Amino acid sequence: MALSALVLGLSGCGRDGDRQSVRAVVDGFYAAVRGHHGDRACALLSADTRRALEKQESKPCGQAVDELHLDDGRPDRVDVFSTEASVELVGGDTVFLGNSPNGWQISAAGCQLQRNKPADCEVQD
């Protein structure tokens, strides 16, 4: 009984730690975009998302992030599901992340959720 309570308690701490890590990645990304620090912003994107952005904008990632139209980057709600996470922002956008060997990385940003349709995102892998 005590062991199961300990395991449950530890799993809750891990989830809270993941939420904090996810929030920090999103905060860092939006701060870098607002500050025109493209290389910092790109470092927080997954490799596939960086490639997709470069292809979409026909520019290196560090320059391409300046072309994104993103809402206010303040996280309102953070949900973590095993190796994936979503963050709803105060301005209405949603950000999706995946947990990789390099930590949490953004797989889609500037997403508008649509009923019964895939999300419409400014950038996604």
Image (tube, rainbow, N blue to C red):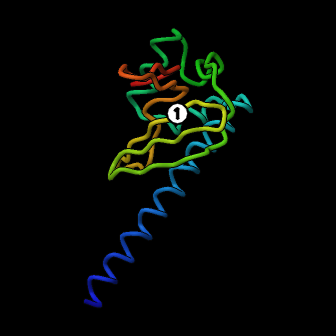
Where is residue 71? Give x, y as percent.
Answer: 66, 28
What's the residue at 41%, 51% (across, down)? 80
Count how many numbered circles sit on residues in the image: 1
The residue most toward the bottom is 2
Q: Is mark 1 on a helix, strand or loop?
A: strand
Residue 36: quadrant of the picture: top right
Mark 1 lies on residue: 94
The residue most toward the right is 35
Where is residue 120? Give x, y as percent.
Answer: 46, 19
Q: Quadrant of the N terminus?
A: bottom left
The residue most toward the top is 58
Q: Is residue 72 depicted above or below 100 in this figure? A: above
Q: In front here: 85 or 124?
A: 85
What's the residue at 36%, 70% (across, down)? 11
What's the residue at 56%, 50% (across, down)? 23
Where is residue 58? Give x, y as percent.
Answer: 51, 9
Q: Quadrant of the C terminus?
A: top left
Q: Is residue 8 depicted above or below 46 in this figure? A: below
Q: In front here: 119 or 82?
A: 119
Is 10 placed left or right of 73 in the picture? left
- Amino acid at the residue labelled 1: Thr
What's the residue at 48%, 34% (across, down)? 45
Query: How many residues crowd mark 1 within 10 Å: few (<14), some (14–19), many (20+)?
Result: many
